Amino acid sequence: GNVMSLMPGPGGNGGGAVFFTALRANFGPSAVTVRGETCTAASAGSFDYGCGGGAGGSLYVRVQTLVATGVVAEAQGGNGVIPPSPAGRVSRPGGNGGVGRVRVDARTVNGLMGGTSDANTAINAAVEPDPGFIATAP
């Protein structure tokens, strides 16, 4: 639906799930995303109601050697919508979707030994939200 016409409709879809495994992965910006969808509908009733964004998905990356340039993986929630209520009407905004879950297992990250503070910092900079991880990928 079109938000401006206040047509009722669903909230945003969730981000889904991805499992990625390889010996070596070279990821550039936004290489793997499981973002929730921003909703596109709102509705009018006794109040004007927005719609909620979809939750971020689940992502599991398991590689021996990871090279990451920029933010390479995201599991962010979609945006909720605030309806464009005319003057004198009360709007009820839709909420944003929650973040998803990410796990990255790698022996080396950008040439750094997995499990070290520098490797952990590199993984956290490359993935949103910050992932869980271990340094023992086969």
Image (cartoon, rainbow, N blue to C red):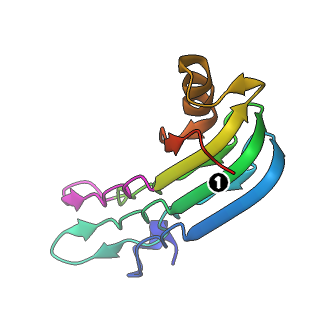
**Which of 93/59 is in front?**
59
Q: Is residue 123 left or right of residue 130?
A: right
Who's the residue at 41% across and 80% down the image?
A: 10
Asked if 29 appears above or below 6 in the picture, the reply is above
**Which of 13/114 is in front?**
114
Residue 126: where, in percent of width, then height? 64, 34
Who's the residue at 38% across and 71% down the image?
A: 42
- Segment tinted magenta in the rendering: 85-100
- Note whether residue 76 is visible: no
Q: What's the residue type where badge 1 is placed? A: Val
Residue 96: where, in percent of width, then height? 36, 55
Asked if 104 appears above or below 22 in the picture, the reply is above
Secondary structure type for disc 1: strand
Q: Quadrant of residue 41?
A: bottom left
Q: Quadrant of residue 11?
A: bottom left
**Which of 77/67 is in front?**
67
- Residue position for label 1: 61
Query: Is residue 89 located in the magenta-colored stretch of the structure?
Result: yes
Q: Is residue 107 left or right of residue 129?
A: right
Who's the residue at 31% across and 57% down the image?
A: 95
